Image: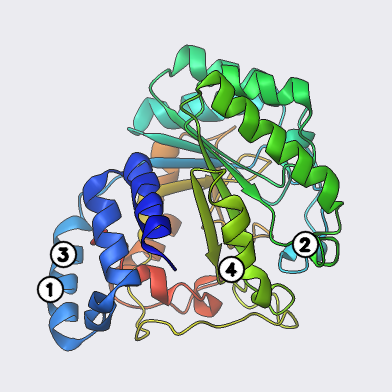
Amino acid sequence: MNLRYIFKEANYYRKVNGLTRAIKKFLLSQTFFSRIVNTEIYNFFYAGIIKRKISSIRPRILQIENTNLCNARCIMCPHRIMKREKKVMDLASFKKIVENVLKYEKIERLTISGFGEPFLDVNFLKKIDFINEKYPDLKIDIYTNASMLTRELTDNLLRKKIDRITFSINGTEKNYGEIMGLNYGKTKSKVLYFLERKKKTKSKLLCNISLVIIEENEKDVSNFIKFWSPLADSVRAYVPSDWAGALKNVKIISKKRLKKRRWPCFVLWNTVTVDVKGNVIMCCRDYESNVKFGNLLKNNIKEIRESKKFKILLDKQARGNYFTPVCAACDNSFDSSLDWIC
């Protein structure tokens, strides 16, 4: 990993999350300072930070699953075994959910992501227009496999106010088809056109290219970064989640991790996660929406987050009790050791 790549990534995350957060995250996860994470002295101060923040922190991120339909067959994604009804969230429901949450919470970032390919939603651009017009200061994140991009869609996206788009490519020419079940040549050409147009139009939209590291692509990570890094704002290669124990047969490559320790999950306080039917669920790892706290088409977010069921979950997390559905099998110990300070 060369210095040019490191500084480029640091600059990207500075633009996304601010300089202070980017520096702290980088130092505590990518440098020798990572050795202090979850040591006795680190834990003493980290516990104090959580204690000070936990009673006052409010959601800043709203994640909405606009569809759980997907045209890919990624071997490291539980979509292949997901039993939930497949559908697209209609425009009226999307508007109602956004208005519901933003009436009560000071949301800074809207993430359009879930267990589906967002561009299969024919009203996707109308949803973006709604946000741009009614909530112009709300930052928008999009996660897509890029296979549904067209030149017309590319040009439309670049004209919208979107903060960041992540293209999940996850492979190279020799293994992409096996990993994602899509055509590498077609996807590559669509992403290259997007990046070319982004540069030509001088768009401020940030573009990230991502790859999850599994046995099938482990040896190609360096070449993947080398190819995409000069073209995109960021290239991220990372070890994937096992989706709370759902993917038992995927040969995930485990990098050397920080000393593991479970801490309260920051996401439960910081993020409102909504599935395609409008249910407020625990987090993105609950791919079957097994744990529901209410529905934003029927209840307001204040009622849901102040409900007995939700408060019991937060109380258990705050006390270090992680023996709840989804949480019990979650592999979030790495992120939970950094999130409250970063």
| Mark whose residue sits in front, 1 or 4 | 4
Left of 231 or right of it: where is 82? Answer: right
Where does label 1 land, which residue?
45
Q: Which residue is mark 2?
A: 74
Kind of residue indicated by mark 4 = Ser
Question: How many angstroms separate mark 1 from mark 3 (CA)?
Answer: 6 Å
Q: Which residue is mark 4?
A: 222
Q: What residue is pinned by disc 3?
A: 49
Looking at this view, is 273 or 171 the one in front?
Answer: 171
> Residue at 51% of width from left, 76% of height from top?
331
Q: Is residue 153 left or right of residue 305?
A: right
Disc 1, disc 4: CB below 8 Å?
Answer: no
Q: Reading the chain from its start, which is encountered first: label 2 or label 4?
A: 2
| Badge nearest the viewer, 1 or 2 | 2
Residue type at mark 3 is Ile
Q: How is the image coloured?
A: rainbow
